[in-house]
Amino acid sequence: AQKITQTQPGMFVQEKEAVTLDCTYDTSDQSYGLFWYKQPSSGEMIFLIYQGSYDEQNATEGRYSLNFQKARKSANLVISASQLGDSAMYFCAMREGQQASGGSYIPTFGRGTSLIVHP
Amino acid sequence: DVKVTQSSRYLVKRTGEKVFLECVQDMDHENMFWYRQDPGLGLRLIYFSYDVKMKEKGDIPEGYSVSREKKERFSLILESASTNQTSMYLCASSLRGTSLEQFFGPGTRLTVL
């Protein structure tokens, strides 16, 4: 079973509108973290936002916010006031509580959502 | 400005060739990762390293090996390239910690003919 599910292969939004990109996750750990990354056509992945499982408030970073619903195991990314430059692939990722070697945590990525912003 | 660099953006090799993909980070990060990205499959971890000379297999290590002789450099090696290794390869690094994000390089698009 996939640990991170992004059900929307592609999304379209009008410039200046808000858009929500879905992400659901599967873990039995109490301590975990959720990340969102953006990948423009240039290829480089860019970190957007992080939410820890114990964080009481939804994370926000500028126009990005994470709608964290723990009971539903969802961590949707909300982009407000979309811009043309927001057109990109977006990946949700999770690191679970179990440490890998060396005390490191290895995130698992979803398959991504392609967002196109129309003028 | 933090940086992860990869030796090539585009690479074309022939079946059976030995291929080296190099990754360098200048942030003194302990962790370094190699991912493969294919359409519809997202990012899949090939190998990761948490220290010099230390490596761990990821989800798809078959056909690949890695080397980390210096903290800042992590190399991915395809001993005998095959056409099914045609893909985008992404290198990443991170500090050791639970909430710390990964920093990615620009990627290498490898084509094996």
Image (tube, rainbow, N blue to C red):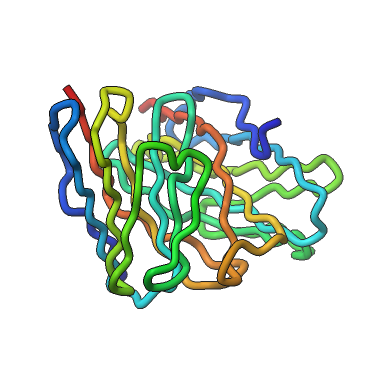
In this rendering, position of residue A1 left or right of residue B108: right
Q: Quadrant of the N terminus of chain A?
A: top right
Q: From where the camera sits, is residue B6 visible?
A: yes
Number of dots carrying numbers: 0
Residue at 66%, 33% (x, y): give it. Answer: A2
Question: Which image quarter: residue B31?
Answer: bottom left
- Residue B1 appears in the rendering: no
**Whole-percent x, y for residue B95 in the image:** 47, 72
Q: Nearer the viewer, residue A49 or B28?
A: B28
Coordinates of residue B43 in the picture (x, y in percent):
46, 39
**In the image, is A21 to the left or to the right of B66?**
right
- The one nearer the camera, A72 or B48, is B48
Whether B84 is drawn above or below A93: the answer is above
Query: Horizontal placement of A28 versus A79: left or right?
Result: right
Q: Position of residue A46 (x, y in %)?
A: 40, 52
Which residue is pictured at 82% across the width and 49% down the height? A28
- Which residue is at 63% across, 55% downward? A95
The one nearer the camera, B17 or B99, is B17
Image quadrant assignment for residue A88: top left
Compared to A1, does B51 lie above or below?
A: below
Residue that sits furthest to the right in the current view: A71
Residue at figure coordinates x 78%, y 64% from the top left? A54
Q: Residue B100: x, y in percent?
A: 54, 67
Image quadrant holding the C terminus of chain A, namely: top left
